[in-house]
Image (cartoon, coloured by chain):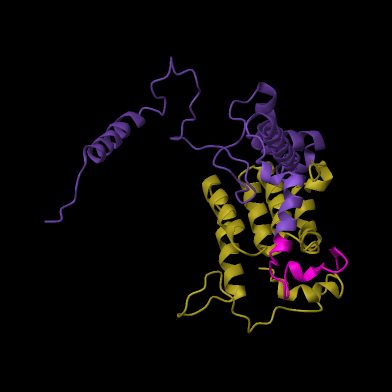
Amino acid sequence: YINTRVLRGLQSGLSSDRLWSFSSTASVAARSYSHGKQETDEEFDARWVTYFNKPDIDAWELRKGMNTLIGYDLVPEPKILEAALRACRRLNDLASAIRILEAVKDKSGPHKEIYPYVLQELRPTLSELGIPTPEELGIDKA
Amino acid sequence: MEMLHLTAGRVAGLLSRRGVAVFSTSGVKMASHGGVTEQTDMSVPLYCDRLDTPLPDRPYKDTLSAADKSLKQKEKGPWNSLSKEEKLALYRIMFNETYAEMKKPTGEWKTVLGGIFFFIGFTGLVVLWQRYYVYPPHPRTLDDEWQAMQVKRMLDMRVNPVEGFSAKWDYEKGQWK
């Protein structure tokens, strides 16, 4: 997931070749236990990518997954979102795909750099699947 | 012996709660004239517009027109072949308000502030009316004339002559210092 600590790297330039990387020593779990092995960021991301990549995922699982993910105190990594968008494609649900993008923008809160970064990373997928951004549809303004 | 005093009122309360439980399963339409108010069926998946729930339990429109149905069929094909209007229509079938619409400021604060000022103003009018119609006449000890005589009496008996009241009066010149 995108931790706001790492946003400093973003400010140095949103180029496609990463000038920064997540510190692999960071073990910030989505849940805070006082004991037990903490899940790393990479494990968290991988778990969610696997969830959405299920070939025969059903609509309920998509909704449950997205609503749960949005409930966490983080913005999901683009690779998780890509898996979710592809799941929407398998379920023939364009509206939910657009909704997911709206939710990502909302989750970013005051950190306005996150959403353009996510869109930039998702651009190939969006073009391939034909998913418009809320801005392209004009629904980003009330 | 200190026992729990189950008063009649307490017993009635317990029993009435049981009674309400029996009635409430059939819908919360109590003894009204005919129960015209529509009651949401909470036993089926409901739609909601919530920022923290991007994908509600059911689509917004569940009865689709023929045009909508054919659009849903088209949705099964490549999305690149959908026009912008069609994509927007698909969104609106599934969802009621967009995130932007959900987050739109309501201007409710103006109503709240206006209401506050209105009722403060109304209270002011009530207080004014009270002043003229409710309060009894002033006691005569508050008249200027009486107050002057009172001050003279206090000075004559040298009230607080060291540091307080009379200390501020110049007895030679007959005026305040």
Rendered residue at 53%/37% (across/down): B46
Residues in magenta, as a range: B154-177
* The residue positioned farthest toward the bottom in the image shown: A25
Quadrant where the C terminus of chain B sits is bottom right
In the figure, the shade used to draw chain B is purple
Image mark count = 0
Foreground of the two, A80 or B161: B161
Q: Nearer the viewer, residue B106 or B85?
A: B106
Q: Is residue B68 above or below residue A5?
A: above
Is B156 part of what is drawn in magenta? Answer: yes
Between B28 and B17, the one nearer to me in the picture: B17
On the image, the x and y values in percent for residue B159 come to 69, 66
Q: Is residue B106 visible?
A: no
Residue in the image at 78% along x and 46% along y = A134
Residue A47 located left or right of residue A108: left
- Could you tell whether A59 is left or right of A15 in the image? left
Question: Residue B64 appears at what percent x and percent y?
Answer: 63, 26
Q: Is residue A67 visible?
A: yes
